[in-house]
Amino acid sequence: MDRKVYFKGRALPFLLLLPQLAVTAVFFLWPAAQAVWQSTLQQDAFGLSTSFVGLENFAEVVADPNWRGAAWNTAVFATSVAVLALGVALFLAVQADKAIRGQRFYRTMLIWPYAVAPAIAAVLWLFLFHPNIGLIGRALNAAGVMWNYQLNGNQAMLLVVIASAWKEVSYNFIFFLAGLQSIPKSVLEAAAIDGARPLRRFWTVVFPLLSPTSFFLLVVNLVYAFFDTFGVIHALTKGGPGKATETLIYKVYVDGVDNLNLGSSAAQSVILMLLVIILTVIQFRFVERQVHY
Amino acid sequence: MSTLNLSGITKSFGTTTVLHGIDLGVADGEMIVIVGASGCGKSTLLRIVAGLETPTTGHVAIAGREVTRLEPADRDIAMVFQNYALYPHMTVAQNMAYGLKIRGTPKEEIARRVAETATLLGIQPLLERKPRQLSGGQRQRVAMGRAIIREPKLFLFDEPLSNLDAKLRVQMRGEIRRLQQRLGVTSLYVTHDQVEAMTLGDRLVVMHQGRAAQVASPMEVWARPADTYVASFIGSPAMNLLEGWLAEDGAAVQLKAGPLLWFTDGPRPGGNGRPLTIGIRPEHVLREGGVPVDVELELVEPLGSETVLHGLLPGGETLTAKLPGMVPAVGSAMEMHLLAEAMHVFDASTGKRLEA
């Protein structure tokens, strides 16, 4: 069956595409262009005059030790979130795949966190880990662990990583479960007959067959950690203590909104934009070359 | 010595019982074909032997060793799956080497055996390919290779040819048989195809609703089917099963369709009027030289070397005849002859074979 639809003129297809194009133009292209333009400008402290400075903002951003610190935080944060979210999701997916009864129940329960807004998720973890009122925070202190993420930078980082990963586990879980269920049962049985024990089977058969899924999720998780975790960080630590949990995306906000250094903030967001473009290109290239078993 | 012994195997899934006590002894080097319609429990039985399912009751012994509760890995068996179940991310060579590698076979030995097996199956040029680059027949060979390379005690085949086209199926059927005889490995082969069953098996297990209806050599199953199910399942077109009653003090049968057929191998027990089912293969319905009966023709299927005719007997039963050569359709009514000495006699209520 030929599903292609042919239009006689050009007017109708353009009209049909218009809403989508308009949304993209208004909410993405226009602000992006503004950011690029803004990144080449500098304002005086009172906002009275604006001058074109070329790439000077970029040079300043890259040379700024604070920005480099944020870049390092981002690397640590994104890697930890991705590894944690992928690892936990894979483990849960393998367990859910094994479950014969109640699979739908597990699946539904594990998907819920994805529907929770970042700020709500952050508050939830805050209530768990707050040193004075949090259930786990108090328990940790009672057990002799000096737990206070408001003072200890590493603990703050740990907390935002956990909260951010928790939200992403759901998404990864769905993909891993689908990936596991698409592996023919007979292939695993063949491996069992070939003498492979469950653990060996997992590493030599299941894991390689999941690798396309894993790679896809890795990129998605990195993008998520880079760009979508603002809400979690803002609600939990506001980038603190000090700048311990200030990631690149958070610094864009701090410099632009709090410090009103629009030129620098714009330059930083342009750098982030380039980063996401690169990740997307890698993703697309890989998807094209991807082996479908 | 690699024998296989099954005793009292039953299997229930919840309240459904799919196997009702299977006993089977397979001799060393013997090829047993388990044949039956889908849902008869044949695949479940094979999976129990493989260790992929646990029997509800009963015991499995391979080469005299009780393996009922052992993992598949500990049974020293190999299995060829219907969908081949090759590892998609490994090359042909890696697929075949996988089992050896897990058992810690030295590298040189693995390489030697992969080369040997590939030569045996004629797949040397494919060793570096991935399964998705292979045709159905080639995948089938690789699956065979993966099974024989380990030199297992027992081969299990789960409908290995049903995904191939008809021509390739015939060719692979021959290859499997030659290979099995050459290697002399005890084998269990599951199929729903009666031609495969007849040509491959030293003995057949005809399964029906979770029971072994008959365990015998192919020719025995064909010549002396144990009950009406086996009779109608083996042979193509299926055997005609006609209603009748014992007559002439057990010496003959009165068919509902009219004719009286005399038993040529002696009388059957029971009084006159005992209900019987009479089986006559389509091959044993002739144009002359038997007991005549009038047939109203419904359908003529010319197959070239033979012609299959479907018709109605007086009384409404259907009769299928397979006649050699071309038979011109001669109107709608035709006289055919039933070969009395080739008929099979079954009890009408139990369906069991009645010997003289």
Image (spheres, grey):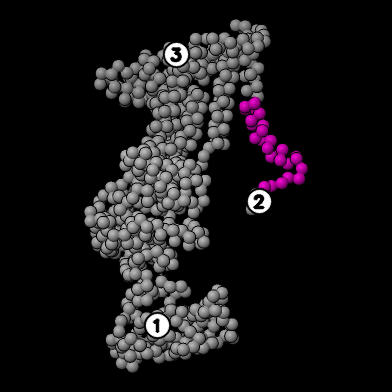
Instruction: State the extent of the magenta-drawn residues as a range.
Output: A4-29
The mark found on residue A2 in the picture is 2
The residue that label 3 is drawn on is: A243
Q: Is residue A12 left or right of residue B310?
A: right
Q: Chain of mark 2?
A: A
Which three-letter amino acid code belongs to the residue tagged 3?
Answer: Lys
Q: Position of residue A9 (x, y in %)?
A: 77, 43
- Report the mark closest to the observer, 1 or 3: 1
Q: Earlier in the sequence, mark 3 or mark 2?
A: 2
Q: Distance of mark 1 from mark 3, alpha carbons?
A: 97 Å
Of A44 and B136, nearer the camera is B136
Which type of secondary structure does the marked residue at label 3 adopt? loop
Residue A202 in the image: above or below residue B276 = above
The residue that label 1 is drawn on is: B342
Q: Chain of mark 1?
A: B
Is disc 1 in the same subunit as disc 3? no
